[in-house]
Image (spheres, rainbow, N blue to C red):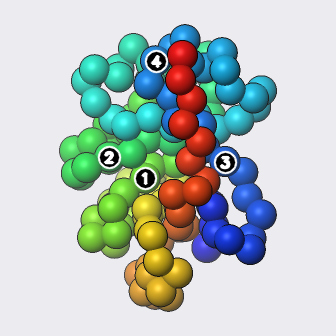
C-alpha cells in the first residue's frame, strides 16, 4: 500500500492547482493535483501534453474512466468508491494508482483488505495559487 501524507511515513506532496498559471509556482518534478471537471480540461490537457505527473480527484466511475484515458498517474477517490474503482482499474489494466482520500488511520486496514493501491491524507496536498 502506498501512503501519502501519513504522519510518520515520509512521502511526496501533491500540489493542488486550479489553473495553468499556478503550475509555475510548483517545484520541478512534483506531482500536480486537480479535480476532474469539464472546467479543468484545459489544465488536464496541458499537464498531459507536457508529460507532467498528475493526480485527478474524481466523483464517479465515468470520471474514473476519463481520468485514466487522460493519463493521470493517480486517481483520488472517496473511501466509499475505492473498492469499485480498484476493481475497474484492475479489470482495464489501468496504469494509474487508485488512492482513497481518508482522514483517519483506522481506515487503512479496511482499504488494505479491499486491495486499494494507497491512501491519501489531507496534509499531503499543498494548495497552490496562481
Q: Quadrant of the C terminus?
A: top right
User: Label 4: which residue?
Assistant: 19
User: N-terminal of the two: label 3 or label 4?
Assistant: 3
Q: Position of residue 55 (x, y in %)?
A: 51, 41
User: N-terminal of the two: label 2 or label 4?
Assistant: 4
Q: Position of residue 77 (x, y in %)?
A: 36, 57
Q: Position of residue 44 (x, y in %)?
A: 44, 23
Q: Say if mark 1 contacts mark 3, CB within 8 Å.
A: no
Q: Residue at the spot x=53%, y=23% of the render?
A: 129
Mark in front: 1 vs 3: 3
Q: Say if mark 1 contacts mark 2, CB within 8 Å.
A: yes
The kind of secondary structure element at disc 1 is strand
User: Label 3: which residue?
Assistant: 13
> In the shown orientation, is residue 88 left or right of residue 103?
left
* Residue 95 can be seen in this image: no
User: N-terminal of the two: label 2 or label 3?
Assistant: 3
Q: Residue at the spot x=56%, y=47% of the render?
A: 125
Mark in front: 2 vs 4: 4
Q: Position of residue 106 (x, y in %)?
A: 47, 86
Which of the numbered marks, if any, corresponds to residue 76? 1
Mark 3 is surrounded, within 10 Å at the Cα level, by few (under 14), some (14 to 19) or many (20 or more) other residues, namely some
User: Label 2: which residue?
Assistant: 58
Mark 4 is surrounded, within 10 Å at the Cα level, by few (under 14), some (14 to 19) or many (20 or more) other residues, namely some
| CA separation in Å, label 2 and label 4 | 17 Å
Residue 126, placed above or below residue 17: below
Amino acid at each position: 500500500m502506498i501512503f501519502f501524507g501519513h504522519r510518520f511515513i515520509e512521502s511526496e506532496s501533491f500540489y493542488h492547482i486550479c489553473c495553468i498559471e499556478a503550475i509555475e509556482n510548483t517545484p520541478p518534478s512534483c506531482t500536480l493535483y486537480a479535480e476532474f471537471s469539464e472546467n479543468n480540461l484545459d489544465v488536464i490537457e496541458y499537464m498531459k501534453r507536457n508529460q507532467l505527473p498528475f493526480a485527478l480527484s474524481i466523483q464517479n466511475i465515468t470520471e474514473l474512466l476519463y481520468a485514466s484515458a487522460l493519463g493521470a498517474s493517480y486517481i483520488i477517490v472517496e473511501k466509499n468508491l475505492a473498492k469499485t474503482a480498484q476493481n475497474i482499474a484492475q479489470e482495464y489494466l489501468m496504469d494509474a494508482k487508485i488512492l482513497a482520500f481518508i482522514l483517519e488511520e483506522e481506515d487503512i486496514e479496511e482499504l488494505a483488505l479491499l486491495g486499494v493501491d494507497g491512501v491519501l491524507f489531507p496534509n499531503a496536498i499543498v494548495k497552490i495559487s496562481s
